[in-house]
């Protein structure tokens, strides 16, 4: 991670500054370390609550520990412990990066919590809290970073450098029956990302979204029965498999990648194709009636497997080299 030595090839993120939210542990930590290794100055943001459901007393320790680790390796970093789901604190986070580094170049949104429950059992608070942290948290930081880039671009009369990497989940793609709040929030993040990508492209900013699969505090139940590799080696579900893609999307080399959804895990990256119309029916008259709809849709779905939904469960089966 050391940045010294004029004889070395310039690091791809040298001279850039970045914010990584939820960076005190797991994926966010791995991403912050990777951005720093590639030369970026990093704001390590983490609210620091110990429970994966967002419970417990907030602590500055996780964010500060990662920031110290980056500095010890020769990088530049400082910790920020604000709650990104709070509009004012998200604004302060972005402003702190600008104040410290003169500008913001990269925003990686990763902060999140879980409150799993079946839809018929879910409490209002469990819904609201998850949507607040994931979806509103992504919006809050994006809103202030986007305003910064727009203002800079207008002031200079030219595009600026900006990268957003958001974090969705295969739970959104596959439906995840026990996570209606999480799946909905993660689906919303994809919509937020594509909208942002279109809105900010003229200012020189790209926005992409990843669906990472990794063994973290958030996924300890999902991967409880899967052990790491025997005899050492990197766990296929290690967050370190995800971080390089985030670093790449944050780099100048990824300028042509915008508004994309990528699934990443264990040495595999899959570019997810946007939805396509599978079948189309036109009414014989000006509008459809009940009987005609039953005739065309009934016949169409009778040919498809029983219980098949829009959920792309096959994405969960992707392995290296497939697709």
Image: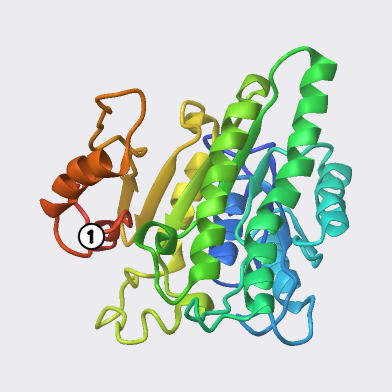
Residue located 25% across and 82% down the image: 231
- Tell me residue 302's x, y (percent): 13, 53
The foreground one among 283 and 311 is 283
Q: Position of residue 14 (x, y in %)?
A: 64, 38
Report x, y in % for residue 252: 54, 30
Using the image, determine if residue 10 lies above or below residue 305: above
Nearer-the-camera pick, 169 or 2 = 169
Element assignment for label 1: loop
Q: Dot 1 corresponds to which residue? A: 308
Total residue callouts: 1
Residue 154 lies left or right of residue 175; in this view the side is right
> Residue extending furthest left?
303
Q: Quadrant of the N terminus?
A: bottom right
Q: Is residue 306 left or right of residue 170?
A: left
The reply to whether residue 226 is in sight is yes
- Identify the colour scheme used: rainbow
Q: In the rendered view, tell whether residue 133 sits above or below residue 87.
A: below
* Point 57% across, 76% down: residue: 114
Tell me the residue at 75%/30% (across/down): 149
150 sits left or right of 170 in the view: right
Q: Quadrant of residue 84?
A: bottom right
Q: Please report the residue visible at 60 percent of the width from the left and 59 percent of the height from the top.
A: 110
Where is residue 205 shown, x and y percent of the image?
63, 30
304 with respect to 250 (left or right) = left
Snapshot quadrant of residue 250: top right
* Residue 72 in view, yes or no: no
Q: Quadrant of residue 144?
A: top right
């Amino acid at each position: 991670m050391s940045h010294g030595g004029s004889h070395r090839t310039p690091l791809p993120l040298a001279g850039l500054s970045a914010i990584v939210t939820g960076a005190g542990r797991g994926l966010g930590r791995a991403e912050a370390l990777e951005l720093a290794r590639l030369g970026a100055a990093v704001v390590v943001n983490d609210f620091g609550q110990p429970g994966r459901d967002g419970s417990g007393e907030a602590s500055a320790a996780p964010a500060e520990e990662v920031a110290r680790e980056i500095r010890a390796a020769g990088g530049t970093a400082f910790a920020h412990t604000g709650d990104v789901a709070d509009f004012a604190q998200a604004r302060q986070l972005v402003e702190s990066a600008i104040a410290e580094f003169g500008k913001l170049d990269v925003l990686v949104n990763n902060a999140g919590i879980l409150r799993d429950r079946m839809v018929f059992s879910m409490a209002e608070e469990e819904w609201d809290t998850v949507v607040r942290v994931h979806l509103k948290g992504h919006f809050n930081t994006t809103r202030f970073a986007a305003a910064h880039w727009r203002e800079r671009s207008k002031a200079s009369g030219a595009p600026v450098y900006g990268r957003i990497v958001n974090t969705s989940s295969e739970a959104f793609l596959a439906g995840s029956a026990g996570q209606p709040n999480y799946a909905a929030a993660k689906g919303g993040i994809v919509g937020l990302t594509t909208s942002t990508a279109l809105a900010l492209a003229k200012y020189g900013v790209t926005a992409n979204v990843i669906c990472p699969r990794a063994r973290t505090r958030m996924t300890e139940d999902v991967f409880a029965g899967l052990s790491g590799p025997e005899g050492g080696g990197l766990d296929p579900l290690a967050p370190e498999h995800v971080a390089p893609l985030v670093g790449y999307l944050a780099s100048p080399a990824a300028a042509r990648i915008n508004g994309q959804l990528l699934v990443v895990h264990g040495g595999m990256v899959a570019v997810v194709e946007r939805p396509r119309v599978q079948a189309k029916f036109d009414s014989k008259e000006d509008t459809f009636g009940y009987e005609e709809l039953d005739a065309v849709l009934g016949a169409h779905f009778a040919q498809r497997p029983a219980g098949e939904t829009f959920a792309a469960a096959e994405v969960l089966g992707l392995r290296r080299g497939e697709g």
